[in-house]
Every structure is written in C-alpha cells, then in structure tokens.
Image (tube, rainbow, N blue to C red):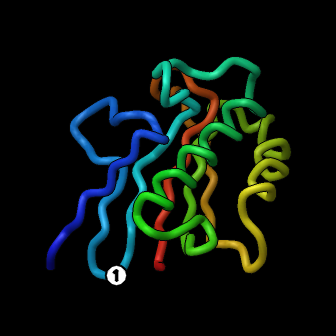
Amino acid sequence: MSRKIIHTDRAPKAIGPYSQAVAAGGAVYLSGQVGLDPASGELVKGGIEAEARRVFTNLAAVAEAAGSSLAAAVRVTIYLADFGTFATVNRIMQEFFSEPYPARVTIGAASLPRGAAIEVDCILVP
C-alpha cells in the first residue's frame, strides 16, 4: 500500500515527528490539530470558541490540501481539556460540518499540547 504525505502552509507545521495528514488505502488520516495560528505558530487567544474555530479551520485546510473537504469526514475525535465546553464545541462544529454528520468520539483529556483547550483529528474518505 502506498502512502502520500499531505502538507499545507495554511495549517500549522507539525510540532513533532508526524505529518499533517497521510493518504493511504482510499482514506486520508488527518493528525490532531490544536488552535495554533499557522502564521505565528502560537495558540490563538479568545478561549474555547476561538480555539475550536481555528482547529476546524486548520483541519479544513489540510483536507483541502488532500484534494478533499470536511464533508468527506467519516470519523472525528475531539479531545477536551474541560468537558464544560462540550456544548460550545458542538455549536462550532456545526459551522464546519453538515448532515449527515461523521461518527464522533469526544474524550476528556488532562492536558493537551501547548496548553490547548481542544484538539481534533479526523478521517476522510473522499
């Protein structure tokens, strides 16, 4: 099985030994994104709303670089540092996804990279 590495400057550079996404076997696996601004590399200010929008914007940019979009998402995993933000994240997710929605898991995390409030990864089947 061949793999294609996906990269875009419209999303933050990987902050470790991984790729923004990998296409393989007819699917595209998007690495977790936190609310980093791609230009500055810094976590966006403005709390969970700003971070969540940036996360989904980053994921959308990587999906586009793969020749796809978030409409092709079949699975989304959301990691939250505070489950009290669950309703806010649901509302913002609806700005980026429409029915039929992808399958989803939401996990409470003790801590996330760079002190982020949210991290999201995604699997696309274009």
Rendered image quadrant of residue 29: bottom left
* 38 vs 47, nearest the viewer: 38
123 left or right, relative to 117:
left
Residue at disc 1, secondary structure: loop
Q: Residue at x 77, y 70 (%)?
A: 98
- 46 vs 115, left or right, is right
Figure quadrant of the N terminus:
bottom left
- Residue 112 position within the rendered picture, expressed as x and y whole percent measured from the top left: 50, 29
Disc 1 target residue:
26
Q: In the picture shown, does residue 33 fall above or below 29?
A: above
User: Looking at numbered disc 1 in the image, what kind of residue is underneath it?
Assistant: Gly
Badge count: 1
Q: Nearer the viewer, residue 26 or 109?
A: 26
Percent of width and height locating residue 53: 70, 40
Q: Residues within 10 Å of mark 1 (few under 14, many from 20)?
A: few
Q: Residue at x 40, y 64 (%)?
A: 66
Q: Tell me the quarter of the picture where residue 16 sits.
A: top left
* Rendered location of residue 119, percent (x, y): 55, 40
Instruction: Name the residue at 69% across, 18% down.
Output: 45
- Residue 54 location (% of width, % of height): 64, 37
Identify the residue at horizontal 72%, vertical 57% (top origin): 96
Give the residue furthest to the left: 1
Pick whichever, 8 or 59, lies toward us.
Answer: 8
